[in-house]
Amino acid sequence: MAEFLTDVETLRERARREIEKGPVTDAYGADLERVLQVLNEALATEIVCTLRYRRHYYTASGLYSEPVAAEFLEHAAEEQQHADKVAQRIVQLGGEPDFNPDTLTRRAHAGYDASADLIEMIKEDLIAERVAIASYTEIAKWLGDGDPTTRRVFEDLLAKEEEHADDLRGLLERMPRHRKD
């Protein structure tokens, strides 16, 4: 078996010399600036999703709106948690999270929606979840072993987005105007 670990003295000297880099060491194998850009796009996506779900929660109305609105509120809270995780990772990597409201929708992968119809709200949220799933899958693959910590962040987000999509599909299937009986 080949030696793989740099000698301890070299590791210690490098750690002291580059202390300002925080957790980013020579072992970091990704393009840091591009990773920070992608993370800020994901941050914008999560914020836009939080806002869309909140809007849908407050404006959902009709006979079937109560359980659907409750799901919207739960998803809004989880999307905010995603935004927080992404912002924390940006800071860990020495970047600055971009919360600029003037550019959020341009940077976000998923869109904002102001539908008034309950079924359209569910559909638009499901579309946004599918966009996030596709984006985060590509990002996790792109990161590979270059930044395993950020890859795990995206894998965790991906699992939750898949759960959201499944929840929304179930809601949509239970809606009377949508069923194909």
Image (cartoon, rainbow, N blue to C red):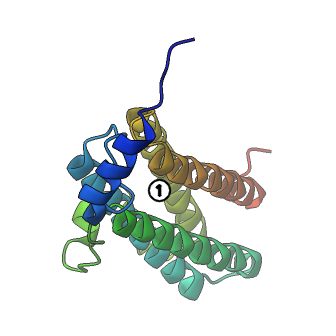
Q: Is residue 37 above or below residue 47?
A: above
Residue 163 seen by the camera: yes
Q: Residue furthest top?
A: 1
Residue at x 30% of width, y 49% of height: 14
| 99 and 8: which is toward the camera | 8
Q: Position of residue 122 (x, y in %)?
A: 59, 63
Tell whether 48 sits left or right of 80. left
Residue at x 56% of width, y 88% of height: 58
Q: Position of residue 166 (x, y in %)?
A: 69, 51
Residue position for label 1 = 128
Q: Residue furthest front?
A: 9
Query: From the image, which quarter does the N terminus lie in?
Result: top right
Query: From the image, which quarter does the C terminus lie in?
Result: top right
Q: Position of residue 144 (x, y in %)?
A: 44, 33
Residue 112 seen by the camera: no
Tell whether 3 sits left or right of 92. right
Q: Amino acid at mark 1?
A: Ala
Q: Is residue 63 above or below residue 160?
A: below
Residue at x 34% of width, y 60% of height: 93
Q: Is residue 113 above or below residue 152?
A: below
Residue at x 44% of width, y 70% of height: 88
